[in-house]
């Protein structure tokens, strides 16, 4: 699926009464009075339009049930992608993965449109946000392994790789942030050798399956005892090597730091990489779904590609500084993750 520039004309504020009426009718729900633009997380109350500026979201109370309505974000709102994503989610739920149930419309569709905007409706899942508890991290690793061992696939889902996604993010960075041209050049220099090394190690022959595509701490809900209550936000899911999810999970749970209570990357990252945390996550994952020798050989290359992608994301969101000194810290982390001794040098 294409990596797209964020539209400047989109209104990501909360939904109105017109949409409420359409949802109630389209989904044949009991009478609903209003949308609730908040999420409750223990004793925390979060305004949805403050928490996220990627799409419209709201909690809906109808009768004695609660639902979560979400507009599909602009970067994955192609109808083919939405259809594949919703089919994959439903298949994973039926396979026993903790995925929130998609509510079908009165016509049996798993998503719907109002004008040029596309929406999905879920059963509301109560849960706590990620708090970096070790048991939350372990539970996340085990659930990711269950997701992959479900062996769900979809003939019409996009087929991508971590390397094409990283390259597309670099291209978008060049287009959107002119001041980041030097950073984009450095990232291209980092990406090229790991892509070559992955090809030489047989990356193209690795088995494929449905992957979440955005498996990070903020797309999970947890119970009071730190188990995963639900995996959410399958907007980016596709069919490719599971190393995409594994690499992104290792980076977002074990390597990256975040700015206070947000999904944005912290301006100052911890260094060096906590290899013990990476090892613990991977060990927990492999209790359920061991990597093959070929996957183990390709994992450092996948880590490098996803690190490039996430660096681009941070630069696009203005989380990160584009100065050479700041970027150097990210290059050093790339070297630690991939085993490279210098920019462009193989391990």
Image (cartoon, rainbow, N blue to C red):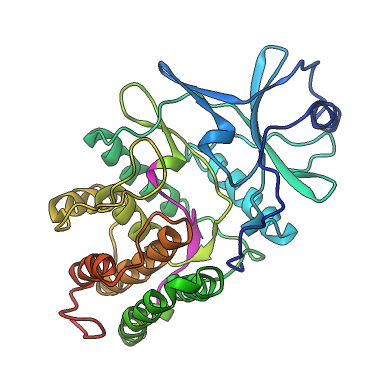
Front residue of 115/175: it is: 175
Percent across and percent down for residue 107 are 85, 39
Percent across and percent down for residue 321 are 34, 61
- Magenta: predominant secondary structure element? loop
Residue 261 versus residue 111 in the image, above or below: above
Rendering quarter of residue 338: bottom left
> Is any atom of residue 256 visible in this view?
yes
Q: Is residue 212 magenta?
A: yes
Percent across and percent down for residue 263 are 42, 44
* Residue at screen point 43% across, 38% down: 220
Q: Is residue 11 magenta?
A: no
* Residue at screen point 47% across, 76% down: 167
Residue 262 versus residue 277 in the image, above or below: above
Front residue of 130/8: it is: 8
* Residue at screen point 53% across, 55% down: 152
- Magenta part of the protein: which range? 205-217
Residue 327 versus residue 253 in the image, above or below: below
Q: Report the quarter where the N terminus lies.
A: bottom right
Percent across and percent down for residue 142 are 32, 43
Residue 64 versus residue 323 in the image, above or below: above
Rendering quarter of residue 296: bottom left
**Number of marks in picture:** 0
Front residue of 189/282: it is: 189
Front residue of 257/94: it is: 257
Q: Report the quarter where the C terminus lies.
A: bottom left
> Is any atom of residue 161 visible in this view?
no
* Residue at screen point 29% across, 54% down: 250
> Is 28 placed left or right of 143 in the picture?
right
């Amino acid at each position: 699926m294409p990596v797209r520039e964020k539209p400047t004309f989109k209104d990501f504020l909360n939904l109105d009464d017109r949409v409420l009426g359409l949802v109630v009718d389209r989904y044949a729900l009991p009478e609903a009075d209003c949308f609730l633009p908040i999420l409750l997380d223990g004793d925390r109350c979060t305004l949805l339009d403050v928490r996220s500026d990627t799409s419209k979201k709201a909690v809906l109370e109808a009768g004695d049930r609660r639902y979560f309505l979400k507009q599909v974000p602009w970067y994955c709102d192609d109808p083919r992608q939405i259809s594949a994503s919703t089919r994959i989610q439903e298949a994973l739920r039926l396979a026993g993965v903790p995925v929130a149930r998609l509510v079908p419309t009165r016509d049996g569709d798993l998503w719907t449109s109002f004008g040029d905007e596309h929406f999905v409706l879920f059963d509301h899942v109560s849960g706590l946000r990620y708090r970096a508890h070790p048991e939350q991290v372990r539970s996340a690793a085990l659930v990711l392994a269950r997701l992959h061992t479900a062996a769900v696939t979809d003939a019409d889902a996009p087929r991508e790789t971590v390397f094409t996604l990283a390259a597309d993010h670099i291209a978008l960075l060049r287009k959107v942030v002119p001041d980041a041209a030097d950073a984009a050049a450095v990232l291209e220099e980092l990406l090229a050798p790991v892509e070559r090394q992955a090809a030489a190690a047989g990356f193209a022959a690795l088995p494929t399956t449905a992957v979440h595509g955005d498996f990070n701490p903020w797309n999970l809900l947890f119970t009071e005892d730190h188990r995963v209550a639900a995996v959410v936000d399958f907007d980016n899911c596709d069919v490719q090597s599971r190393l995409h999810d594994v690499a992104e999970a290792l980076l977002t749970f074990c390597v990256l730091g975040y700015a206070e209570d947000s999904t944005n990357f912290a301006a100052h990252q911890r260094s060096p990489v906590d290899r013990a945390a990476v090892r613990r996550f991977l060990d927990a994952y492999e209790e359920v779904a061991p990597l093959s020798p070929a996957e183990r050989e390709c994992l450092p290359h996948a880590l490098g590609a996803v690190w490039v992608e996430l660096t681009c994301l941070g630069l696009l969101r203005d989380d990160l500084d584009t100065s050479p000194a700041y970027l150097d810290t990210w290059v050093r982390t790339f070297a630690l993750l991939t085993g490279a001794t210098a920019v462009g040098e193989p391990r």
